[in-house]
């Protein structure tokens, strides 16, 4: 599990922040963040849902990161690691 503590600043006031792996307990907040970042006319069916988030933390937890500022989620990053061979032109995400 990844976890890094640091401070962000609101004007001159330091506020505790953490970058860490997100977990199932964070899914509702992650979906709320997507709703705020991708409002209509962006279709909500393109947001990550709980099943997709669960699949990601189960299969690739290292790529499931969030930032928590003063105890509240403020953003997330979802990455995927794949084996890539530049000599293989038929690469797929599978």
Image (cartoon, helix red, strand yellow):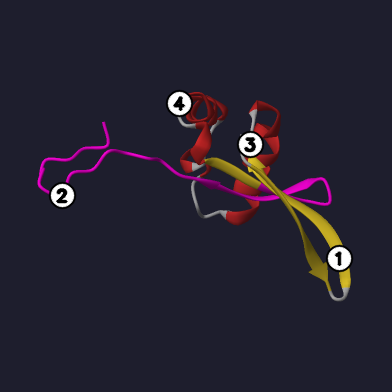
Q: Is residue 82 left or right of residue 77?
A: left
Task: Please name the residue that numbered disc 1 is placed on.
Answer: 14
Task: Please name the residue that numbered disc 2 is placed on.
Answer: 86
> In which quadrant of the rendered view does residue 85 lie?
top left
Say which label, 3 or 2, has the lower sequence index: 3
Q: Position of residue 84 (x, y in %)?
A: 23, 43
Q: What secondary structure is marked by label 3? A: loop
The C terminus appears in which quarter of the rendering? top left
Q: What secondary structure is marked by label 2? A: loop
- Report the magenta residues as a range: 67-94
Instruction: State the CA–CA distance, disc 1 to disc 2.
Output: 45 Å
Contact, mark 1 vs mark 2 (Cβ under 8 Å): no
* Marking on residue 22: 3
Q: What secondary structure is marked by label 1? A: strand
Residue 13's place in the image compared with 32, above or below, is below
Contact, mark 1 vs mark 3 (Cβ under 8 Å): no
**Residue sitting at x 81%, y 68%:** 9
Say which label, 4 or 2, has the lower sequence index: 4
**Residue sitting at x 58%, y 43%:** 65
Instruction: State the CA–CA distance, disc 3 to disc 2.
Output: 31 Å
* Marking on residue 59: 4
Instruction: State the CA–CA distance, disc 4 to disc 2.
Output: 24 Å
Q: Nearer the viewer, residue 11 or 33?
A: 11
- The answer to whether residue 27 is magenta is no
Q: Position of residue 64 (x, y in %)?
A: 54, 39
The overriding secondary structure of the stretch rendered in magenta is loop
Q: Position of residue 57 (x, y in %)?
A: 53, 29
Q: Position of residue 59 (x, y in %)?
A: 45, 26
């Amino acid at each position: 599990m990844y976890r890094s503590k640091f401070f962000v600043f609101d004007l001159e006031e330091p506020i505790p922040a953490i970058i860490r792996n997100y977990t199932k307990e964070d899914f509702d907040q992650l979906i709320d963040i997507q709703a705020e970042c991708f409002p209509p006319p962006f279709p909500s069916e393109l947001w990550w849902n709980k099943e997709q988030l669960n699949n990601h933390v189960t299969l690739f937890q290292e790529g499931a990161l969030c930032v928590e500022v003063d105890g509240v989620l403020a953003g997330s990053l979802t990455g995927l690691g794949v084996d890539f061979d530049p000599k293989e032109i038929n690469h797929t995400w599978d």
